[in-house]
Amino acid sequence: MYSASSSSGFPVTRVRSNAERDPKDLEASLNHLLQLHNHNSLSLRHDAEKAKKNAIAKAEKVSELLVEAVNGGVQDSFINQKRIESEIRSLASTITSFIKQTDQWLSSTHALNTAVKEIGDFENWMKVMEYECKSITAAIQNIHQE
């Protein structure tokens, strides 16, 4: 057994094993360490590959969910847009109908106004005629009395 110091400053005590004394045991130990290293490396590689596949699968799922969420909103917007366009066409035809009806009402009220004016004019003419008739009658009576 002998002592040495490590880079940290603490003494390192090393015990000589039987493998250090016999080269065949040393080779067997190195082969064993190499096999352990290869096994651990394969195990780590397998675990890393498994984790990678799992991460890819989860990323695909998240991507699909995001696409569905966005497409769902777009689809709802598209349906609402079509519904609004249909309502606009319906309202435009209703407005056109109301415009025609309003024009008819305006025409009818104008005709009624004209008729009322004519009645008023006729009534005024009748009053003028009545006054003139009374004037003529009064003049005739005055002539008869003289």
Image (cartoon, rainbow, N blue to C red):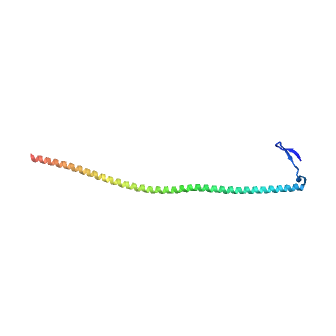
- Name which residue lies at 76% across and 57% down: 43
- Name which residue lies at 30% across and 52% down: 114
Instruction: Determine whether, in the image, residue 137 is placed left or right of residue 68.
Output: left
- Quarter of the picture containing the C terminus is top left
Q: Quadrant of residue 28?
A: bottom right
Depth check: give the residue in front, 93 or 36: 36
At which x and y percent is residue 98?
Answer: 40, 55
Instruction: Determine whether, in the image, residue 72 is placed left or right of residue 89.
Output: right
Depth check: give the residue in front, 1 or 57: 1
Instruction: Determine whether, in the image, residue 27 is placed left or right of residue 52.
Output: right
At which x and y percent is residue 67?
Answer: 60, 56
Instruction: Determine whether, in the image, residue 48 is placed left or right of residue 144.
Output: right
Depth check: give the residue in front, 98 or 25: 25
At which x and y percent is residue 122?
Answer: 24, 51
Q: Quadrant of residue 99?
A: bottom left
Farthest left residue? 146
Q: Quadrant of residue 103?
A: bottom left
Depth check: give the residue in front, 35 or 134: 35
Q: Is residue 93 above or below residue 131?
A: below
At which x and y percent is residue 108?
Answer: 33, 54
- Name which residue lies at 42% across and 56% down: 94
Marks counted in the figure total: 0
